[in-house]
Image: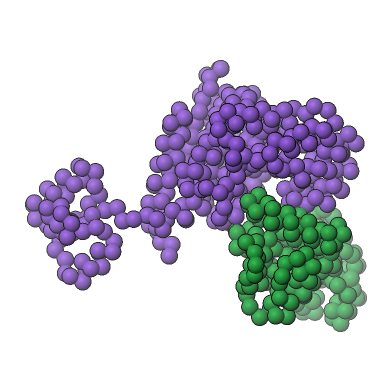
Amino acid sequence: MLSIALPKGRLLAPAVARLRAAGLALPDAEALDRRLVWEGDGWRAALAKPADVPTLVRYGGADLGICGSDVLGEDGEGLAQPLGLGIGICRLALAAPKNGPVRSPADCQGRRVATKYPRTARKWFKTLDVEATIVPMHGSVELGPLTGLSDAIIDLVETGRTLKENGLVELVTVAPVEARLIAGRAALKLKQLETARLIAALRAGSGS
Amino acid sequence: MRTITSGAPALRSASAALRELYISYGYEEALTPSFEPWDELRPALGRHALKQTLKFIDDGGEVAALRPEVTAGLVRRALRERRPDEIRRYFYCQKIFRRSPVNGRREFWQVGGEILGGAGPFFDAEAVELLGRSLQLLGAADFTLELGDGGLLIELVPDPALRGELKGALARHDGAAAARLAAGAPEASRPLLHELPFLRGEAAVLDAAEKLAPRPLAALARLRALGLALEKRGWVEHVMFDLALPGWADYYDGPLVEAYAAGVAGVAGAGGRYDGMTAGLGKPVPGCGAALLVDPFLERLNGKQKPEAVLLVGDTAGASVRAAELRVAGRAVVQLPALDAKTLVALRGQYRLVDEGGNPC
C-alpha cells in the first residue's frame, strides 16, 4: 500500500491529473475534494492543506506527497524531493507599491517586508547582504503595504493580477516555484519497488 | 492515551535488553554530562546537532550546551582516558535534546555504542551488527541497514562548497539537481556522480560504481570489505548498499550506516566511522559507532506492557510479612488496607490481586 498526501486548493487538480496519468486510479479532483481520505487498489490518498503535506510525509502519515517548492523552502528539511512535476509553475517575487520607496531589493535595507515565507525571505536577503525586517503573515500579504504594516511583500505570483489590483508592482523574482513529489526517506527504502515505479511513471509523463 | 507513566515500563525493558546486548559484546556503559561546554563540543558536532543545540549561559558566564548528541562528547572524554594502542568499547543509553528525526519531539532516547582504537572493516561490521541486533531486540522485523561511505564524495569532488551542495541534493534524492551540480565536478568524476542516486542495492552496485569511477576509489574498497565482514557475521538479508547515502553527521568520513524500519518514518538509527573527528580533537585514533533511536519502538511496545505488581489487601502484621516475603522472592507488591468492593473492582484492572496468604483472590 502506497500512501500519498495531496494538497487541497489550486494544486489538487493538476496533481491528480499527473497521478492518474501515471497509473494511479484516483477519482477526479472534484470528487476527491469531498473526503479527506480515499483508498483504492494499492494506494491511499489523504487531502491536506499544502503546508501540512511535508509534516504528513515527514512523520509517516503518508509515504509520498505533492507540494509546491515554496512550501518546501519553509519546511522541507529531512524530506526526499525526487522529482519536479512541471505543475503549479509560478514564482516567489518581491513586490512593492507602485510609487513607494522600494524599487529594488537593496531598498529593503532597514525596511519591513511582509510574507508568508519568512524563512525563504530571510535566506534570500542574507545572500544579498540586505537587512530587512521580515513580518510573517498567514493570509493576504497585500494588506502589508495597504495598511502601512510593511513597505514591500514577498509572495507567490502567477499572473500578477492580484498585485496590480492592489497597486503593487513586481520587482524581482526571489525563487521559481514548481510542485514537487516528496517522499519520506524510510518509504523510499522500505517500499523501494512501489515508489520507484511511481516515480518512473511520473518522470516519463513529465519528460524530465 | 499517553500518560506520564505509560512509556516507563517499555523504556525500562527496552533499555535493559539493549544494555544486556552491549554488555554481551564487552562494552562498558558510559554516562556523559547533560550539559557540555559549548566551545569544546562545537567543533566535533554533526550538522543537525549543531543547528538544534539548546544553549544556556551558566553561572560562570560560559555557554553550556544541553547534550544534542552523545558521540562527540563521549569520544572527547574517552580520548583523554584511553591508553595508547588500547581498543575501548563504550555504550550509552541516554536522552538526546534536539528535534527527533522521527517524530519531531524535543528530546528522545538513544542507545548506541562506540569503538575507539579499532581500524578497518571488522570493527565497522561490529557497529552495524549491533545496530541490527538492537532493531531485532526491539521487535523490528522489516528493516534495512543501508551502507554508504562518507569519503566517497570527498574523493570525487575536491571543492568543499560544491561537495556540500551535492550532498544536499543527494540527501533530497533530487537527481536533476545532483546532475546539474555534477557538471561542476572534475570531468573524470562525472559519470559516477550522475549515477550515484540510482546506485542502491546489493554488492552488484559496487561493481557498477567501480566501472564508472575515475580510478580505484578507497571508499568503494572499504564498502566491499565491510560487506564481506558483515557476511562473515551472517548479515546479508537486511544489508543494502546506497552510494548516495548522505550520513547522519558530517564527521563520518568512512563507511556509514543508516537503519530504516517499517512503521518508523525517518532514520531509525545511524552511525559510521569518524577517524577525522578524533584527529580534529588532537588525537588521531580510529573510531566508529552507531546508535538507535529508541522512542519509536517504545510507542509500539507500550500497549504490550502488562501490570507487573500484585495487590495485597490487608494491614495486619501477617499481611506485611507476606508482602515482604513476596518482595524478597522478586515480586512487586502494592499493599493496601482493606478496601470497599467498588475500589477493589477498579483495582482489579490495574493489578493482579492476592490475599494475605499470597493466593490469587
Where is residue A116, by image quadrant?
Answer: bottom right
Q: Residue furthest top?
A: B85
Q: Using residue B324 as the reference point, say whether residue B82 is left or right of it.
A: right
Count the marks. Answer: 0
Residue at (66, 80) in percent of width and height: A34
Of the chain colours in the picture, the one used for chain B is purple
Percent x, y of residue A199: 76, 57
Instruction: Please indicate, yes or no, whether residue A78 appears anywhere in the rendered image.
Output: no
Which of the two residues, B277 or B116, is positioned nearer the viewer here? B116
Indicate the quadrant where residue B225 lies: top right
Q: Position of residue B285 (x, y in %)?
A: 61, 24
Residue farthest along the left direction in this orientation: B317
**Residue at 87% from the left image edge and 48% from the top image edge:** B180
Q: Nearer the viewer, residue B153 or B235?
A: B235
In the rendered image, the quadrant that contains the N terminus of chain B is bottom left
Residue located farthest toward the bottom when viewing the structure as drawn: A165
Q: Is residue A61 visible?
A: yes
State the green chain.
A
Q: Is residue A126 above or below residue B199?
A: below
Q: On the rendered image, what quadrant is the C terminus of chain B found in? A: bottom left
Residue at 77% of width from left, 75% of height from top? A13
The percent coordinates of residue A59 (x first, y second) are: 60, 59
Locate residue B40, reporting x and y percent: 60, 35
In front: B28, or B278? B28
Image: A160 above or below B218: below
Query: In the image, B107: left or right of B361?
Result: right
